[in-house]
């Protein structure tokens, strides 16, 4: 950060005083009397999401509104109502040591690294204006660098009318709202594409990630071509972008009402209870367990090509059922499987109930079944076909 963003000794006292005033019961004013830009000193995605949630829960916005500016080390963030196994290659993220986080707002999946800027606009619900926020950012980019910037009907910010440089999401309740967005300044696009690539198990004959086999009502991301702001403007830097957007935000309140840029330390000392919020956001029960109920159907090529349907709720397998072929003359999946494979197979499938779902469930299921038959040949050789 440039010298413009250095912390002042009185910032913490100002922050606590502002918090006490904001927490007091009073009707929200139509227009804010004061504006501040908070600059998070953390690059941890769970810490920053917790800070965002803490401010949302504890401040009463309206008279004093905030713009929170934050960046994260490499990670992937999914929307509140998304299915991570449909959105990203979870195995790659694990191998790369890259966190997967679920935020409280809706919307699609995004990749973060230190070349991506996150902006959260906090206000009273009645002051919420997503369009105004987006155009403020667009105006700062046009005025500072002459970018050809537009905002489309999906509230994405586009560069040169074609390349997405910003995605947006929001959370609103009765009294409070926040609108947050990403801004690609100098993102590692190779890592972005690899991290958001849906998995292809091409080396495993049982599964080539059939998205049609994963049925879910979860929100799906909408792919779009992307580009960094820095690609066409070498003078662009993170510090300059932060300064341009922050100053334009503060100008809305005038000099007397601007509280300026304030470095904040996301910790329990500054924000009591923050650590508990962070722990909750990092808990697998939230990241994976919040996934809307879904089913996944796949074939086991090493086991007579049996088709299996897995039901998943809160990230846990609730049902595993073999499915009969279309021409099975009304015979159930379990009866059909017993006719062509060792009789214990339905029970072995049922033993997966209660286990955590994972992306390579087909490989995991075959391993379980083959391990109980002694070899793959045993599974393949029992090919008594049900009379049709």
Image: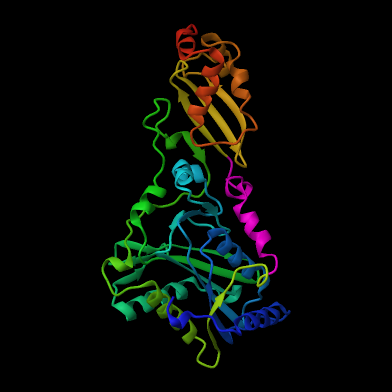
Front residue of 118 and 150: 118
Q: Is residue 231 left or right of residue 267?
A: left
Q: Quadrant of residue 243?
A: bottom left
Q: Is residue 331 visible?
A: no
What residue do we see at 33% from left, 52% from top? 190
Q: Quadrant of residue 278?
A: bottom right
Front residue of 296 and 315: 315
What residue do we see at 54% from left, 9% from top? 339
In x, y percent, where is residue 225?
32, 56
In x, y percent, where is residue 221?
44, 51
Snapshot colouring: rainbow
Q: Give the extent of the magenta segment.
A: 272-293
Q: Is residue 125 visible?
A: yes
Q: Is residue 254 above or below residue 53?
A: below
Q: Is residue 227 above or below residue 239?
A: above
Q: Is residue 310 left or right of residue 201?
A: right
Q: Is residue 84 above or below residue 237?
A: above
Q: Is residue 258 above or below residue 155?
A: below
């Amino acid at each position: 950060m440039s010298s413009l963003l250095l912390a002042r000794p009185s910032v913490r006292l100002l922050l606590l005083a502002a918090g006490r005033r904001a927490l007091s019961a009073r009707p929200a004013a139509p227009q804010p009397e004061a504006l501040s830009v908070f600059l998070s000193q953390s690059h941890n995605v769970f810490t920053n999401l917790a800070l965002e949630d803490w401010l949302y829960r504890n401040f009463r916005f309206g008279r004093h509104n905030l713009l929170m500016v934050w960046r994260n080390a490499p990670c992937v963030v999914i929307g509140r109502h998304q299915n991570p196994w449909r959105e990203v290659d979870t195995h790659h993220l694990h191998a790369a040591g890259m966190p997967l986080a679920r935020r409280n707002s809706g919307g699609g999946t995004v990749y973060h690294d230190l070349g991506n800027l996150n902006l959260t606009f906090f206000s009273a619900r009645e002051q919420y204006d997503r369009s105004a926020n987006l155009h403020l950012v667009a105006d700062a980019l046009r005025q500072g660098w002459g970018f050809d910037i537009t905002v489309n009907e999906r509230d994405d910010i586009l560069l040169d009318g074609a390349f997405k440089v910003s995605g947006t999401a929001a959370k609103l309740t009765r009294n409070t709202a926040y609108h947050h967005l990403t801004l690609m300044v100098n993102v590692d696009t190779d890592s972005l594409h690899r991290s958001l690539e849906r998995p292809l198990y091409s080396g495993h004959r049982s599964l080539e990630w059939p998205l049609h086999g994963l049925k879910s009502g979860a929100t799906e991301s909408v792919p779009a071509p992307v580009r960094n702001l820095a690609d066409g403007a070498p003078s662009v830097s993170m510090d300059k972008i932060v300064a341009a957007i922050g100053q334009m935000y503060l100008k809305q309140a005038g000099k007397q009402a601007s509280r300026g840029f304030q470095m904040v330390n996301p910790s329990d000392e500054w924000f009591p209870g923050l650590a508990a919020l962070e722990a909750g956001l990092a808990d697998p029960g939230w990241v994976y367990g919040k996934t809307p109920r879904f089913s996944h159907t796949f074939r086991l090529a090493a086991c007579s090509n049996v088709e299996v349907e897995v039901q998943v709720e809160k990230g846990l397998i609730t049902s595993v059922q073999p499915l009969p072929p279309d021409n099975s003359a009304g015979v159930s999946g379990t009866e059909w499987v017993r006719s062509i494979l060792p009789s214990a197979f339905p029970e072995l499938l049922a033993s997966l109930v209660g286990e955590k779902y994972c992306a390579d469930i087909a490989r995991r299921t075959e391993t379980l079944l083959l391990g109980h038959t002694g070899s793959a040949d045993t599974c393949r050789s029992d090919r008594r076909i049900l009379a049709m």
